[in-house]
Image (tube, rainbow, N blue to C red):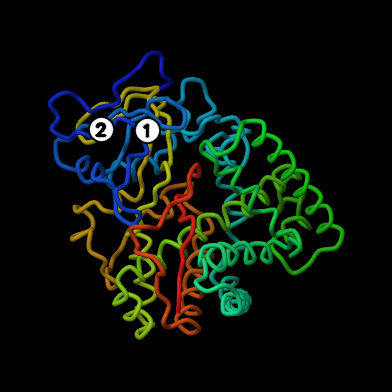
């Protein structure tokens, strides 16, 4: 709920599970979870009410696996639209922000409209298409390493490889001209901003992004290519397609979400592997471990973003406690991925862990529809780095790495590396 008065943001009195009053919780190390996550998963700990740093509103924080999965899977009781009255804001200005839904009957809403939209888009993210895309991803990855080898040394893996790889892949997949790819960086940062940009900058960016996507859709309908957006554009308005405005919104979503989170993961996984180079060496020498290792590294990640919020439409019982209606809860997926009741020895990195039902891509009807693409990009990215830069190492201690501020994706700002 929105702040009506100054609230302490602490758990119930006498709980024995003290946490920081402001959220997101502070981190002592860029690759380690905050102490609050473990405390709040302990039996008997209440679900605390804390103050969001960016907005000053109050939310309840969910850190247990079952609570998080329930919130993400039950769209009737847990509404994902924070533009409705009374919902807390996780950003400085939620108007047009990452958690506002512009049309409650549209493709980003819940129910039948959203499921129809997912079916239309999901058919273009099949395993067959991802397999066919691998040579192009590998070509882009090798080209980026070529540039790294001829560039400054030490190099910044974040700006030289982790960020541009997914940008170029999603640009090629959707049919956006290569000379426009640099624009996506700014637009996606606006869409995923906590408090980095003003409300006016966000609105202007949205308008510019929408105008660009509308122009691109028109161009691809008139002269389609062998890309996903062309396929969607040429069926727009038919029984097998989607309306024009929905297509434009789809293009914006895929371009922004299709690279921002993946680039963050490439950078953070590289840092995790290089912090202890025995991890790097083990995967480099035994590529058969990569599929399960990638799943484990996705689980192990300590994403510093704000999590996925939901607004309660009715009273909900979680872990034996009633959370009242009109409360905003935040699902902390990386905290749930450290839940010992689901993942034994959860703080230990185990490349052979199986099964591994992590929530890195969410759960339920709004789970990440690009997760097959993300997994493909991660696998090709690390195969390329192992082949081309086998002696890669961090140029600074891992504890000196810093995160980008003001964004919800929790990416590392720079990753200085040598080889």
| Disc assigned to residue 329 | 1
Q: Secondary structure at mark 1?
A: strand
Q: Secondary structure at mark 2?
A: loop
Q: Nearer the viewer, residue 127 or 227?
A: 227
First in sequence: mark 1 or mark 2? 2
Lateral position of residue 237 relative to residue 406, left or right? right
Q: Quadrant of residue 354?
A: bottom left
**Residue 111 visible here:** no
Q: Nearer the viewer, residue 49 or 402?
A: 402
Badge 1 vs badge 2, beta-carbon distance below 8 Å: yes
In the rendered image of this protein, does residue 113 appear above or below residue 137? above
* Quarter in which the N terminus is drawn: top left
Q: Within 10 angstroms of label 2, few (less than 14), some, or many (20 or more) residues?
A: many
Looking at the image, the residue that sits furthest to the right is 222
Tell me residue 62's x, y (percent).
Answer: 31, 38
Tell me residue 40's x, y (percent).
Answer: 22, 40
Lateral position of residue 308 relative to residue 351, left or right? right
Tell me residue 391's x, y (percent).
Answer: 41, 82
Q: Residue shown at 33%/43% (left/top)? A: 68
| Disc assigned to residue 47 | 2
Q: Residue shown at 58%/54% (left/top)? A: 119
| Disc assigned to residue 171 | none
In the rendered image of this protein, does residue 283 appear above or below residue 342? below
Q: Residue shown at 21%/36% (left/top)? A: 319
Lateral position of residue 320 relative to residue 129, left or right? left
Q: Residue shown at 44%/81% (left/top)? A: 386
Q: Within 10 angstroms of label 1, few (less than 14), some, or many (20 or more) residues?
A: many
Tell me residue 34's x, y (percent).
Answer: 28, 46
């Amino acid at each position: 709920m929105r702040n009506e008065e100054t609230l302490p943001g602490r758990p119930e009195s006498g709980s024995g599970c003290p946490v920081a009053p402001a959220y997101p919780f502070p981190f002592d190390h860029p690759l380690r979870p905050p102490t609050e996550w473990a405390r709040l998963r302990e039996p008997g700990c209440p679900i605390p009410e804390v103050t969001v740093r960016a907005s000053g509103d109050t939310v309840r924080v969910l850190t247990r696996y079952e609570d998080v999965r329930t919130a993400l899977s039950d769209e009737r009781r847990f509404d994902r639209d924070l533009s409705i009255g009374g919902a807390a804001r996780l950003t400085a200005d939620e108007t047009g922000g990452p958690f506002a839904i512009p049309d409650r009957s549209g493709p980003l809403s819940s129910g039948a409209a959203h499921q129809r939209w997912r079916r239309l888009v999901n058919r273009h993210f099949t395993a067959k298409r991802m397999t066919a895309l691998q040579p192009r991803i590998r070509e882009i990855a090798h080209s980026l390493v070529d540039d790294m080898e001829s560039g400054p040394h030490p190099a910044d893996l974040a700006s030289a490889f982790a960020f541009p790889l997914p940008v170029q892949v999603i640009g090629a997949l959707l049919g956006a001209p290569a000379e426009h790819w640099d624009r996506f960086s700014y637009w996606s940062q606006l869409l995923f901003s906590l408090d980095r940009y003003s409300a006016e900058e966000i609105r202007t960016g949205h308008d510019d992004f929408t105008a660009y996507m509308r122009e691109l859709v028109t161009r691809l309908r008139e002269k389609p290519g062998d890309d996903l957006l062309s396929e969607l554009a040429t069926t727009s308005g038919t029984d097998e397609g989607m309306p024009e405005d929905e297509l434009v919104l789809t293009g914006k979503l895929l371009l922004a979400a299709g690279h921002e989170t993946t680039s963050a993961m490439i950078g953070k996984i590289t840092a995790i592997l290089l912090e202890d180079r025995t991890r790097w060496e083990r995967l480099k020498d035994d590529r058969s471990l990569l599929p399960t290792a990638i799943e484990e590294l996705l689980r192990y990640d300590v994403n510093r973003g704000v999590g996925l919020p939901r607004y309660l439409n009715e009273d909900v019982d979680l872990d034996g406690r009633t959370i009242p209606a009109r409360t905003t809860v935040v699902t902390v997926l990386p905290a749930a991925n450290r839940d010992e009741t689901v993942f034994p020895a959860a703080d230990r990195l185990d490349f052979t862990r199986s099964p591994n039902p992590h929530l890195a891509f969410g759960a339920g009807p709004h789970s990440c529809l690009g997760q097959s693409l993300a997994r493909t990009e991660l696998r090709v990215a690390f195969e390329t780095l192992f082949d081309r830069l086998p002696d890669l190492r961090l140029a600074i201690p891992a504890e000196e790495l810093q995160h980008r501020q003001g964004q919800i994706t929790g990416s590392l700002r720079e990753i200085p590396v040598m080889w």
